[in-house]
Image (spheres, rainbow, N blue to C red):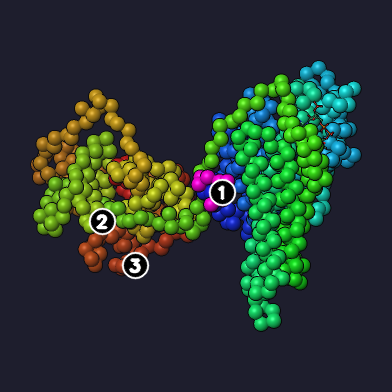
Amino acid sequence: MHVLLTEDQELFRRTVREFAEREIAPVAAEHDENETFPKANVKKMGELGLMGLTVPIEYGGSGAGPVEYALAMEEIARADAAHSVILSVNNSLVCEPIVKYGTDEQKNEYLKRLSSGDMIGSFCLSEPQSGSDARHMQTKAVRDGDYYVLNGTKNWISNGGEAGLYIVFASLEGEEDRSAAFLVEYWRFGINCGPKEKKLGIRASATTQVFLNDCRVPVGNRLGEEGDGFKIAMSSLDAGRIGIAAQALGIAQAAFEASVAYAKERQAFGQPISEFQAIQFMLADMQVRIEQSRLLTYQAAVLEARGLPFAKESSMAKLSASETAMWVTTKAIQIHGGYGYSREYPVQRYFRDAKITEIYEGTSEIQRMVIARSILRGDRPAKAPAEVPVEAPEIVTPVLTLPPTPEELKQQMAPRKLHHVAVAVDSVDEALKFYRETLGLEEITVMNLEDRGLKVGLVKAGPSEVELLEPLDPEGTVARFLDRRGPGLHHICFEVEDVETSMRYYEGKGATFIDPVPRPGAVGLVSFMPPALADGVLVELAQTSGYTFPEPEAEAAEEATAPVITTPILRGPAGYARPAFVGAVGAWGQQPTPPAAPEPEAPRSAWSTAADGLRAPVLRGAAGYTRHGLTGVGAWGRQPAKPEAAAPAGAPGTASEPPAASGTGQVASEAAPAAGE
Ligand code: CAA
């Protein structure tokens, strides 16, 4: 653990490193080679909370402080410097000034979008004639009623062409020494960007010119007051320079690690080159310079976090770290020899990327100037614009949650266990007797779920359960299931971590679900896959934790007692007991008459079409279980051909049809599970 960091900050660093190694490092070389802007990863950085790291939580940011910002910059740059400059401009040069100097409207308008990665920010200070001499800008802002009209050209603008919001600095009309800052939206106020500059390094980042031609910006989009422009730019750069120092550190660290690994592996004169003192001294010096710069960088960040003056310290950190990065990457190429000069190896990219850290956000010469001036004037703190109250946001070290890797997702989605096997029965009490008395299994509970038209018995069977389903509602799906199939296997249920996520995951693998979203079941949130998918068995996924059923209203709860069934038990058409038939037939012992007309045809699915012509009575398979739809094909054991493709989940009237449909149009209701199963 680093001496200047807390345990939480180290944890934060590890998470960012894991993210960077997983998402950024593998694509860094390709983006560099093709000079492509890494849009997808910018979005991922936003999702992780890195794009608005220091933005207060109330504005959609992560509420972190300068130390976390430096750590994030270091780790992202260790994977790829181009990614880190996108992050740094968005955070320290765009979000930060809005947090410090923006009005409530401006904060509400922009910070959330900038923090999420939906909108990228850009900082427009440099011009063709003014880079280091930033105070002497040619870009002019002329007040025109409720607007400012901006004219001028900005140079070397990071995120140019990719950003949605540009902070533009401009001199005020007739007052060459006074400037103001403006929040200029690309789409609303009409600014133009030139083509991407062809750069030596950080080639994946976008750098362009920005053209302001009679660009009309409402007064409400001025950041701070008239005359604050230069000070806003300078104080933003104070913080930004810590980020660039951290970026340089990350580049140097990557080059150093590559050098150590290469030196141990590369053989010369009969031994690894790490055995030679010339190499060892280079590695030692590399590490010493990196650690010196790291201390300076963390020191500046800690000072800023404590609200103490840090302008000189941030310049010292940037100067030291950027020159270290240049020196270390030069040595890294030397250690790699010819391979270091090849674009097949990453050290040349580190070397090319390192150079910019000595140039942007103030050249090394400007940093020396800032440090020297500070020494000579006796460390007078730099002034912030007096008229704008600066509220220090509360700082937290965010706990970042990385999205699971495809491998982790696969593991998480795998059913945790067979939760239960559900059996449709005529009488839960009768069936329970068998499980209890004959098999000696332990009964867990019996529930009368009136609202779902079911009586449910649960029996413990090792780590799983047997769920017995008795219909209380003669029109319910279990009753219809019994009508068609007789007592027997109704569905199997697997326990999953999160039903909704599992649904999306399995849909990605071609599965369909009867309902588009989970429904409350007896054991938690559940969702059903149509039997067609599992060759005839309805499959339930259940989330048994993290879901609480809404409390029933007191009055309703009192009313919800099980109905007393007084009618005698009769036999259903397939020879099984159906208490609920009695009311329909009226006389003891009389068999129920089949309905005169078939129920209205349900919309047909691919399955029901395939199963047309199969008018099968319930048959018993070799193992005594019920099988449907076999007679149409002539011989026991032959299955109806599966349709080419299953109907999409949620398509009206399709998803719930079972595989071996009888074609009567009742199949949908047979297979569709009762809510509460
Ligand atoms: N914070 C707040 N106010 C500051 C300040 C700071 N850090 N530094 C200076 N000021 C104020 C001064 O107090 C002074 O105010 P008063 O007039 O009220 O006294 C005013 O600003 C002018 O200050 P100076 O006289 O010191 O200004 P200067 O003209 O001599 O320049 C400089 C100072 C340090 C050279 C400055 O121009 C500078 O830093 N130049 C480099 C610019 C730079 O870094 N450009 C990078 C472009 S952005 C970029 O690279 C982003 C990217 O793409 C990644």
From the viewer's side, name the closer residue of 663 and 162.
162
Identify the magenta region: 1-8
Residue pointed to by mark 2: 463
Q: Earlier in the sequence, mark 1 or mark 3?
A: 1
Magenta span contains residue 41? no
- x 78%, y 45%: residue: 360
Principal secondary structure, stretch drawn in magenta: loop
Instruction: Check residue 672 in the rendering and tell me which mark sits there, or answer none.
Output: none
Q: Is residue 270 left or right of residue 127?
A: left
- Give the alpha-carbon distance from disc 2 to disc 1, as whole Å: 49 Å
Along the line of sight, which residue is nearer the eye, 11 or 162? Answer: 11
Mark 2 surroundings: few (<14), some (14-19) or many (≥20) residues within 10 A: few
Q: Quadrant location of ligand 1?
A: top right
Task: Identify the residue at image location x=29%, y=67%.
Answer: 636
**Of discs 2 and 3, which sits in the foreground?**
2
Q: Which residue is mark 3?
A: 638
| Amino acid on which the number 1 mark rests in the picture | Val
Label 1 residue SS: loop
Residue 3, numbered label = 1
* Distance of label 1 from label 3 (alpha carbons): 73 Å
Residue type at mark 3: give it. Arg
Q: Nearer the viewer, mark 1 or mark 3?
A: 1
Residue 374 lies in quadrant: top right
Q: Position of residue 629 (x, y in %)?
A: 32, 59
